[in-house]
Amino acid sequence: MTATDLGLPAVRRPAAHDPARPADHRLIDSFGRVATDLRISLTDRCNLRCSYCMPAEGLDWMPRGEQLTDDELVRLIRIAVRDLGVEELRFTGGEPLLRRGLDGIIAAAAMLRPRPDISLTTNAVGLARRAAALAAAGVNRLNVSMDTIRPERFATITRRDRLADVLEGLAAARAAGLNPVKINSVLLRGVNDDEACDLLAFAIANGYELRFIEQMPLDAQHGWERTEMVTAGEILELLRERFTLTPDPVERGGAPAERWLVDGGPAVVGVIASVTRPFCGACDRTRLTADGQVRSCLFARTETDLRALLRGGASDGEIADTWRQAMWAKLAGHGIDDPGFLQPDRPMSAIGG
Ligand code: SAM
Ligand code: SF4
């Protein structure tokens, strides 16, 4: 079998300043939302092959020359924090631990003022020996993706027998003082949906915060089916078989997860219901791909090319204004439920989840 083609999304040329856009230095959109949370994909490569993310044979990885260099990336991060009001940075991928120079990129981001909050989303393979250095470089918080605590099942879902590494990585993150350490789990019908309660019990017993993520139409194989996904409603029903859940009184703000106190607290569990309970109205995200494209949404079908500006000699001011214009054009919602919904050409692993 040949590797699935990544496909090329439509690239939006830098638009002229829209006269309707107010003179505001921040990343505002025409619906009044302000993006302060930047998700950065450091690479599209991965060492696992989660079945709901990419095919067994992997993908045609982005050629190295197309990827932003560390210096280019740090320049864009500086513009985002200094000129555009970005307050939070989350590094993701693909697998961000595979990015050479990761610690240096994080250290450079941590030098910025105002100091951004820095977090990482990782599969935790190889994290055990790197967690302390990442914390020292400036990572504040960490999310680890783990869909099962059963080794054979882990090998089936990710197509790699690496659960032990993930568990070691989680423990090392906690020992390095990263707090909270969150676990992200995707439940798949007939595969691991009988494990919802065991995952929560494991997280609580070990001091991690668990969040379930509804499966989204972002897999490279385009195999997602609405009728097959395990919904937030079902996840809560499964958890209530063993736990009492009450809404967490803490204000949700722009956070994607709805949170519940477990058995009265203090333990909590979150559910990110992007499909059945979308939170687009409170979205505060802007996204940068490893090849320097700004996306206003995971599901955007257009991108804005900052790499061409960087490599074409544009000033920081020109780059900042192009980013503002890209975000001004953000749509109201992702439209998964619209009859005409089209999955974006880039899969999750190449956008940055
Ligand atoms: N490789 C890292 C990891 O797995 O944490 C970072 C990138 S991964 C794309 C980020 C998150 O996206 C993971 O928690 C993963 O489970 C989730 N994810 C991937 N494909 C998804 C899909 N089709 N629907 C929902 N979540 C997905
Ligand atoms: Fe890799 Fe993360 Fe996708 Fe799994 S979900 S294949 S770990 S990028």
Image: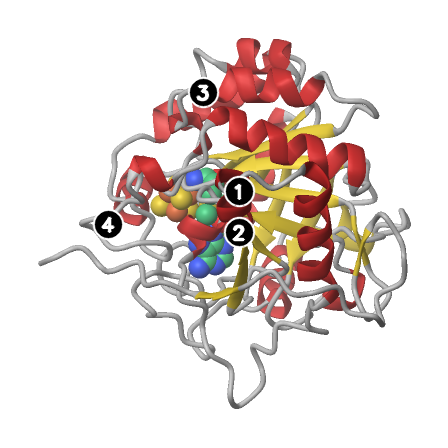
Q: What residue would you read off at disc 2?
A: 196
Circle 1 sits in a helix, a strand or a loop, which is it?
helix
Would you call the spot at circle 4 few (<14 residues within 10 Å), some (14-19), or many (20 or more)? Answer: some
Q: Give the x, y percent position of residue 37.
A: 72, 44
CA distance for labels 4 and 3: 25 Å
User: Which label sits in the foreground, 1 or 4?
Assistant: 4
User: Which label sits in the foreground, 2 or 3?
Assistant: 3
Would you call the spot at circle 2 few (<14 residues within 10 Å), some (14-19), or many (20 or more)? Answer: many
Q: Give the x, y percent position of residue 97.
A: 43, 26
Of mark 1 and mark 4, the one earlier in the sequence is: 4
Q: Are marks 1 and 4 in contact (CB under 8 Å)?
A: no
Q: What residue would you read off at disc 1?
A: 199
Q: Quadrant for ligand 2? A: top left
Of mark 1 and mark 3, the one earlier in the sequence is: 3
Of mark 2 and mark 3, the one earlier in the sequence is: 3
Circle 4 sits in a helix, a strand or a loop, which is it?
loop
Q: In this view, does 28 lie above or below 94?
A: below
**In screen coordinates, is 248 left or right of 146?**
right
Q: In this view, does 285 lie above or below 168?
A: below
Of mark 4 and mark 2, the one earlier in the sequence is: 4
Q: Give the x, y percent position of residue 102.
A: 49, 22
User: Which label sits in the foreground, 4 or 2?
Assistant: 4
Q: Do the residues labelled 2 and 1 touch (CB within 8 Å)?
A: yes
CA distance for labels 1 and 4: 33 Å
Q: Are marks 4 and 3 in contact (CB under 8 Å)?
A: no
The image quarter containing residue 73 is top right
